[in-house]
Image: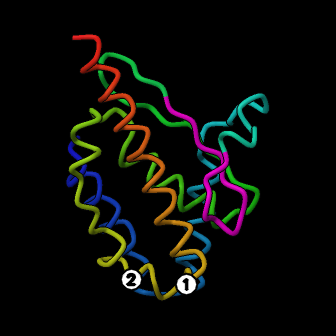
Amino acid sequence: MTINQIQDEIISEFSLLDGDMEMTVFYIMELGQKLPVMPEVDKTEDNVVKGCQSKVWLTSKLEDNKLYFTADSNTAITKGLVSLLVRIFNGQTPDVILNADLYFMNKIGMERFIGTQRSNGFAAMIKQMKLYALAFKTKMEVKS
């Protein structure tokens, strides 16, 4: 699936909640519970996303020129938020990630239920994922 197809799928899922704040927050936390478990060995200071109020750990690896992310957080809602990004970016090439236009947040009205601090942290997560993509893209170009 393309990044836009995945975003449209997320928008469709959230539209079923009809803007209900409590159900939306619960759904985000539920999504976080479905994230694959991050090995404890990866929960290091080097893997902490800077700029998040909660602790968010993020790692990535390149397989067949596509990026795959592993993430976790010490809070349920933040774990749910990072799970959305993992879902969108997993299996995409560095170029696709770097050029991605993320619009799902506005469409689902995310700013209504996460507040300014979490919005800043969410932006930091996106930035970190794009930095990983840039690093892998650079490595790939150096090899060729």
**Badge 2 or badge 1: first in the primary sequence:** 2
Q: Which residue type does callout 1 highlight?
A: Thr
Pointer 1 residue = 116
In which image quadrant can residue 133 be found?
top left
Quarter in which the N terminus is drawn: top left
For the point 37% across and 28% down, the residue is 136
Please tell me whether residue 112 is drawn above or below residue 82 in the rendered image: below
Looking at the image, which residue sits at the far top?
144
Q: How many marks?
A: 2
In the displayed structure, would residue 109 be above or below residue 129? below
Assign a secondary structure to mark 1. Answer: helix
Q: Majority secondary structure of the magenta segment?
A: loop
Label for residue 84? Answer: none
Task: Tell which of 112 and 53 is nearer to you.
Answer: 53
Q: Position of residue 52 (x, y in %)?
A: 63, 65
- Picture quadrant of residue 8: bottom left
For the residue pair 134 and 104, the one nearer the viewer reads as 134
Residue 3 x/y as whole percent: 25, 49
Which label sits on residue 109?
2
Q: Which residues are magenta?
A: 48-60
Q: What type is the residue that disc 2 sits on?
A: Gly
At numbered mark 2, what does the secondary structure look like: helix, strand or loop?
loop
Q: Residue at x 46, y 46 (%)?
A: 86
Residue depicted at 72% across the width and 57% down the height: 55
